[in-house]
Image (spheres, rainbow, N blue to C red):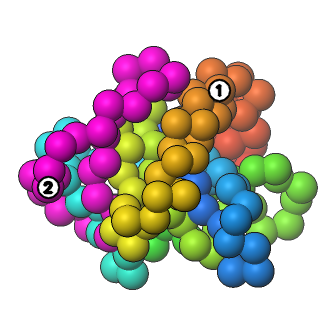
Amino acid sequence: MQISEKKEEFNAVIEGTYHDDWTQLHYKLAHIQVPEDTGVINDGMYKYHFYGKTTDFQSVQPINGEAKGLEAKIDLLCFSPGVVLPYSGGTPNILERPRTVCTKDGRIFIDESMLDNEDYLGVIPSMVQNAGEIFKKKSFAKLYREVTK
């Protein structure tokens, strides 16, 4: 499974950080093909487990127990095409340490090493709200199209 070549619209917001400041949340706009019945996204370096779903980008319904489903193999999320916010020119796509993928259809995948980190899990609701706001803003869709063309 590859990151889509179709770049007109982003369908995922990837939260991640840089190694010099692990507590900061950064967001990357990307277009990723994730089949409906995916339980794990594997980018070759990290595995992101299906954590839950949101229908309104306000609340999160975590799944109970082990996520079942396909393992979707994709290109490395840290270097994949996309735009890291805030975009200020230069290399737009590098996010050193992706941790969570939130898809436009409301699925949430979290890196397996973060699933036991209660502090990180505590920020998931606000991160999902931020992703919802990002999906809504037409200016981000325009920025994504311009930078990835």
User: Residue at the spot x=54%, y=66% of the render?
Assistant: 98
Query: Is disc 1 surrounded by few (<14), some (14 to 19) or many (20+) residues within 10 Å?
Result: few
Give the label, 2 or 1, closer to the camera. 2
SS for callout 1: helix
Q: Earlier in the sequence, mark 2 or mark 1?
A: 2
Q: Position of residue 123 (x, y in %)?
A: 57, 47
The residue closer to the viewer here, 136 or 19, is: 19
Relative to 74, is 11 above or below? above
Q: Position of residue 17 (x, y in %)?
A: 66, 67
Left or right of residue 110, residue 80 in this image: right
Left or right of residue 31, residue 68 in this image: left
Which region shows up in magenta? 47-73
Left or right of residue 92, residue 7 in this image: left
Q: Which residue is mark 2?
A: 66
> Does 50 lie within the magenta span?
yes
Query: Is disc 2 surrounded by few (<14), some (14 to 19) or many (20+) residues within 10 Å?
Result: few
Q: Quadrant of residue 104?
A: top left
User: Residue at the spot x=88%, y=59% of the render?
Assistant: 89
The residue closer to the viewer here, 55 or 71, is: 55
Q: Amino acid at mark 1?
A: Glu
- Label total for image: 2
- Name the mark on residue 133: 1
